[in-house]
Image (cartoon, rainbow, N blue to C red):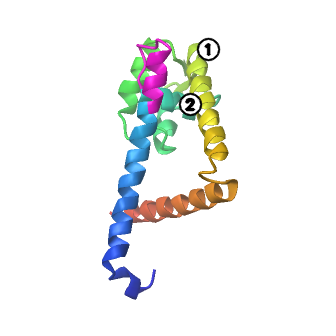
Amino acid sequence: MSSSQDSHPENRTDFLECLRLIERLHRRILDIIKFRLEALGYADINSVQALLLHNIGDREMTAGELRTRGYYLGSNVSYNLKKMVSNGYIKQERSEHDLRSVRISLSQKGMAIHNLVSELFDQHLEEIGAKQLLQNEEFSQLRSQLRELESFWDQQISFY
Protein backbone atom coordinates (compact mmCIF):
# COMPACT_ATOMS: atom_id res chain seq x y z
CA MET A 1 0.00 0.00 0.00
CA SER A 2 1.23 3.49 -0.72
CA SER A 3 1.17 6.12 1.98
CA SER A 4 -1.66 7.94 0.16
CA GLN A 5 -3.78 4.78 0.40
CA ASP A 6 -2.98 4.38 4.09
CA SER A 7 -4.76 7.61 4.98
CA HIS A 8 -8.09 6.66 3.36
CA PRO A 9 -10.74 5.71 5.89
CA GLU A 10 -12.20 3.06 3.55
CA ASN A 11 -8.91 1.13 3.70
CA ARG A 12 -9.12 1.03 7.49
CA THR A 13 -12.79 0.02 7.29
CA ASP A 14 -12.02 -2.76 4.78
CA PHE A 15 -9.07 -3.93 6.88
CA LEU A 16 -11.13 -4.12 10.08
CA GLU A 17 -14.01 -5.81 8.27
CA CYS A 18 -11.60 -8.43 6.90
CA LEU A 19 -10.36 -9.13 10.43
CA ARG A 20 -13.92 -9.52 11.69
CA LEU A 21 -14.79 -11.81 8.78
CA ILE A 22 -11.79 -14.06 9.41
CA GLU A 23 -12.74 -14.33 13.07
CA ARG A 24 -16.41 -15.00 12.25
CA LEU A 25 -15.51 -17.61 9.63
CA HIS A 26 -13.39 -19.44 12.18
CA ARG A 27 -16.20 -19.39 14.74
CA ARG A 28 -18.74 -20.43 12.10
CA ILE A 29 -16.76 -23.50 11.01
CA LEU A 30 -16.44 -24.47 14.68
CA ASP A 31 -20.24 -24.15 14.99
CA ILE A 32 -20.76 -26.33 11.91
CA ILE A 33 -18.38 -28.99 13.26
CA LYS A 34 -20.16 -28.83 16.64
CA PHE A 35 -23.56 -29.38 15.03
CA ARG A 36 -22.23 -32.33 12.99
CA LEU A 37 -20.69 -33.91 16.11
CA GLU A 38 -23.94 -33.46 18.05
CA ALA A 39 -26.02 -34.86 15.19
CA LEU A 40 -23.86 -37.99 15.20
CA GLY A 41 -24.04 -38.38 18.99
CA TYR A 42 -20.51 -37.34 19.96
CA ALA A 43 -20.76 -35.87 23.46
CA ASP A 44 -17.17 -36.29 24.69
CA ILE A 45 -15.43 -34.02 22.17
CA ASN A 46 -15.89 -30.38 21.21
CA SER A 47 -15.42 -28.64 17.87
CA VAL A 48 -12.01 -27.16 18.75
CA GLN A 49 -10.74 -30.63 19.65
CA ALA A 50 -12.23 -32.13 16.47
CA LEU A 51 -10.53 -29.49 14.33
CA LEU A 52 -7.30 -30.15 16.21
CA LEU A 53 -7.61 -33.87 15.39
CA HIS A 54 -8.23 -33.00 11.76
CA ASN A 55 -5.10 -30.83 11.67
CA ILE A 56 -2.96 -33.55 13.27
CA GLY A 57 -4.17 -36.20 10.82
CA ASP A 58 -1.78 -39.12 10.41
CA ARG A 59 1.24 -37.23 11.72
CA GLU A 60 3.05 -37.94 14.96
CA MET A 61 4.39 -34.97 16.93
CA THR A 62 5.08 -33.55 20.36
CA ALA A 63 2.73 -31.18 22.16
CA GLY A 64 5.35 -28.47 21.63
CA GLU A 65 5.30 -29.05 17.88
CA LEU A 66 1.54 -28.86 18.01
CA ARG A 67 1.80 -25.40 19.55
CA THR A 68 4.53 -24.08 17.25
CA ARG A 69 2.76 -25.28 14.11
CA GLY A 70 -0.30 -23.30 15.13
CA TYR A 71 -2.67 -26.26 15.27
CA TYR A 72 -3.95 -25.23 18.67
CA LEU A 73 -6.23 -22.50 17.24
CA GLY A 74 -5.90 -20.26 20.27
CA SER A 75 -7.14 -22.87 22.69
CA ASN A 76 -5.49 -24.38 25.73
CA VAL A 77 -3.43 -27.17 24.17
CA SER A 78 -2.58 -28.96 27.42
CA TYR A 79 -6.21 -29.10 28.53
CA ASN A 80 -7.45 -30.29 25.14
CA LEU A 81 -4.71 -32.91 24.83
CA LYS A 82 -5.44 -34.24 28.31
CA LYS A 83 -9.17 -34.50 27.53
CA MET A 84 -8.58 -36.18 24.17
CA VAL A 85 -6.12 -38.67 25.69
CA SER A 86 -8.55 -39.52 28.50
CA ASN A 87 -11.41 -39.90 25.99
CA GLY A 88 -9.33 -42.15 23.73
CA TYR A 89 -8.88 -39.84 20.73
CA ILE A 90 -5.11 -39.40 21.08
CA LYS A 91 -2.34 -41.86 21.90
CA GLN A 92 0.76 -40.77 23.81
CA GLU A 93 4.18 -42.42 23.74
CA ARG A 94 7.47 -41.40 25.30
CA SER A 95 10.06 -40.45 22.74
CA GLU A 96 12.80 -43.05 22.36
CA HIS A 97 15.41 -40.30 21.99
CA ASP A 98 14.25 -37.90 24.71
CA LEU A 99 12.34 -39.45 27.60
CA ARG A 100 11.12 -36.01 28.69
CA SER A 101 9.29 -35.66 25.39
CA VAL A 102 5.92 -37.28 24.70
CA ARG A 103 4.89 -38.03 21.12
CA ILE A 104 1.22 -37.87 20.25
CA SER A 105 -0.77 -39.40 17.40
CA LEU A 106 -4.40 -40.14 16.68
CA SER A 107 -5.99 -43.33 17.91
CA GLN A 108 -8.50 -45.15 15.73
CA LYS A 109 -11.23 -43.16 17.46
CA GLY A 110 -9.34 -39.91 16.78
CA MET A 111 -8.86 -40.85 13.14
CA ALA A 112 -12.63 -41.37 12.84
CA ILE A 113 -13.16 -37.74 13.91
CA HIS A 114 -10.39 -36.62 11.53
CA ASN A 115 -12.22 -38.40 8.70
CA LEU A 116 -15.58 -36.95 9.74
CA VAL A 117 -14.20 -33.38 9.59
CA SER A 118 -12.36 -34.12 6.35
CA GLU A 119 -15.57 -35.40 4.74
CA LEU A 120 -17.40 -32.30 5.96
CA PHE A 121 -14.77 -30.06 4.34
CA ASP A 122 -14.93 -32.07 1.10
CA GLN A 123 -18.71 -31.71 1.07
CA HIS A 124 -18.44 -27.95 1.59
CA LEU A 125 -15.82 -27.62 -1.14
CA GLU A 126 -18.10 -29.50 -3.54
CA GLU A 127 -21.07 -27.28 -2.65
CA ILE A 128 -19.01 -24.10 -2.99
CA GLY A 129 -17.94 -25.25 -6.46
CA ALA A 130 -21.48 -26.21 -7.46
CA LYS A 131 -22.78 -22.81 -6.37
CA GLN A 132 -19.81 -21.15 -8.09
CA LEU A 133 -18.98 -19.13 -4.97
CA LEU A 134 -15.21 -19.49 -5.46
CA GLN A 135 -13.20 -21.13 -8.23
CA ASN A 136 -9.84 -22.92 -7.79
CA GLU A 137 -7.85 -19.85 -8.86
CA GLU A 138 -9.74 -17.67 -6.39
CA PHE A 139 -9.04 -20.11 -3.55
CA SER A 140 -5.35 -20.07 -4.50
CA GLN A 141 -5.29 -16.28 -4.61
CA LEU A 142 -7.13 -15.99 -1.29
CA ARG A 143 -4.77 -18.51 0.33
CA SER A 144 -1.77 -16.58 -0.95
CA GLN A 145 -3.12 -13.28 0.36
CA LEU A 146 -3.92 -14.76 3.76
CA ARG A 147 -0.42 -16.26 3.96
CA GLU A 148 1.03 -12.81 3.23
CA LEU A 149 -1.00 -11.35 6.09
CA GLU A 150 0.11 -14.18 8.36
CA SER A 151 3.73 -13.54 7.42
CA PHE A 152 3.31 -9.81 8.08
CA TRP A 153 1.90 -10.49 11.55
CA ASP A 154 4.61 -13.06 12.26
CA GLN A 155 7.14 -10.32 11.55
CA GLN A 156 5.26 -7.93 13.85
CA ILE A 157 5.49 -10.44 16.69
CA SER A 158 9.26 -10.60 16.29
CA PHE A 159 9.45 -6.87 17.05
CA TYR A 160 8.02 -7.35 20.55
Q: Where does the image place residue 157, in percent across and percent down from the top left? A: 38, 60
Q: Amino acid at mark 1?
A: Gln
In the image, is residue 40 part of the stretch drawn in magenta? yes
Q: Residue at x 44, y 85 (%)?
A: 2
**Residue most extreme to the right:** 136
Q: Amino acid at mark 2?
A: His
Q: Is residue 123 visible?
A: yes
**Residue most extreme to the front:** 131
Give the crowd class for mark 2: few <14, some 14-19, many >=20 residues within 10 Å: many
Q: Where does the image place residue 143, in percent across and percent down from the top left? A: 58, 56
Q: Where does the image place residue 83, in percent across and percent down from the top left? A: 40, 18
Question: Disc 2 designates what residue?
Answer: 54
**Circle 1: element type:** helix
Check the image and report above or below for 68 versus 52.
Answer: below
Residue 43 is left or right of residue 132, and the answer is left
Q: Which comes before the other along the chain, label 1 or label 2?
A: 2
Highlighted range, magenta: 32-46
Give the crowd class for mark 1: few <14, some 14-19, many >=20 residues within 10 Å: few
* Frontmost residue, 23 versus 147: 23
Residue 61 is left or right of residue 158, and the answer is right
Q: CA distance from mark 1 to mark 2?
A: 13 Å
Q: Residue at x 36, y 36 (%)?
A: 75
**Residue 108: which numbered mark, if any?**
1
Q: Is residue 73 visible?
A: no
Query: Do residues under tags 1 and 2 come within 8 Å of each other at their CB atoms?
Result: no
Q: Residue at x 47, y 20 (%)?
A: 37
The answer to which image quadrant residue 137 occupies is bottom right
Q: Where does the image place residue 117, in percent across and percent down from the top left? A: 56, 28
